[in-house]
Image (cartoon, rainbow, N blue to C red):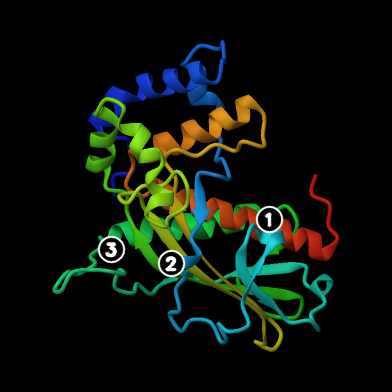
Amino acid sequence: MNLKTTTSARAVRGLGICLIAGATLLSAACQTYDAALGSGTSVTATDSARLTRSGFLSDYARLRPMSALDGIECWRDPRLDPKQFDKVLVSRIVVSLAPPKGQKEGEVKIIDPSDLKTLTDYFHASLVKALKPQMQVVDKAGPGVVVIRVALTDLVPTTVTDSLAGTLIPYGFVAEAGSGVATGRPAGSTPYLGETGMEMQFRDGANGQVIAECRDTEIGRKYAADVNSSAVGAAQTWANGYMSSFQAWQYAKEAFDKWSLLVARRFAELRGVVIQ
């Protein structure tokens, strides 16, 4: 799978980042952005209209948006004592792709199997990396082990050629930046950007009981900025979303990292663990 920036995207890279730096009154040279860019949490956003119902979870009716998880829909057994779990098993991630909404008759959703393996391996590694500082990662279920099961339920790559076209048209970004809200998508997104859906289940490793479930669908945002952060932070998030729009599966990877960090943070909060 080719996750590298396309040749044409490289041609606009320097211009795009320099414009972003200038717009935010940053004096640092444009080259410093490559080293400074992080995975801004606003690069992808939850789209509640695109949540999936694949059958992977046991009960979708009890899921509710959770502010502690940035609006992701979840449910947790009220009898659960999170402190009893100090180990985690991340099961092999499965894929259950539903036909895209609004597809034309005869249109088939096709994804290269090698892409799927790369993406599931990336998500698994991201979860392990995020959880490892606070919990022992094991390969067998048992007492004190929480088992995380994940299904990717929607995967749509970014149409890189459309992203390039929108960037190269003079003032095209003005229309693009507002197109998300106009079409019912998150602000800063455009119709050609990628989206990624997942359903996640947590089980007690001792008895297999379902103790929590979540689902979310994240939409890429080409023009994203965290207006509540500092000027530098907002510029980094904006630049990150802009650069991600030139790679077919980058938004999926951003969503995976976001989910992994949210899960790890929530585990730490519930278990009363302080991460150094």
Check disc 1 and report the residue beneath it: 132
Q: Nearer the viewer, residue 85 or 41?
A: 41
Judged by depth in the image, the label closer to the viewer, 1 or 2, is: 2
Q: Earlier in the sequence, mark 1 or mark 3?
A: 3
Where is residue 77? Give x, y as percent: 73, 82
142 relative position to 270: left or right:
left
- What whole-number distance in Å separates the C-alpha atoms at marks 1 and 2? 31 Å
Q: Amino acid at mark 2?
A: Arg
Q: Amino acid at mark 1?
A: Lys
Where is residue 39? Give x, y as percent: 55, 40
- What whole-number distance in Å separates the C-alpha atoms at marks 2 and 3? 23 Å
Q: Nearer the viewer, residue 162 or 36?
A: 162
Q: Secondary structure at mark 3?
A: helix
Q: Earlier in the sequence, mark 1 or mark 2?
A: 2
Check disc 2 and report the residue beneath it: 50
Judged by depth in the image, the label closer to the viewer, 2 or 3, is: 2
Compared to residue 178, the image places residue 57 above or below, namely: below
Q: Earlier in the sequence, mark 2 or mark 3?
A: 2
Crowding at mark 2 (Cα within 10 Å: few <14, some 14-19, many 20+): some
13 relative position to 235: left or right:
left
Q: Residue at x 61, y 25 (%)?
A: 232
Tell me the number on the disc at residue 113. Answer: 3
Where is residue 41? Give x, y as percent: 58, 45
Q: Amino acid at mark 3?
A: Pro
Farthest left residue?
A: 106
Q: Secondary structure at mark 2?
A: helix
Where is residue 165? Give x, y as percent: 23, 35
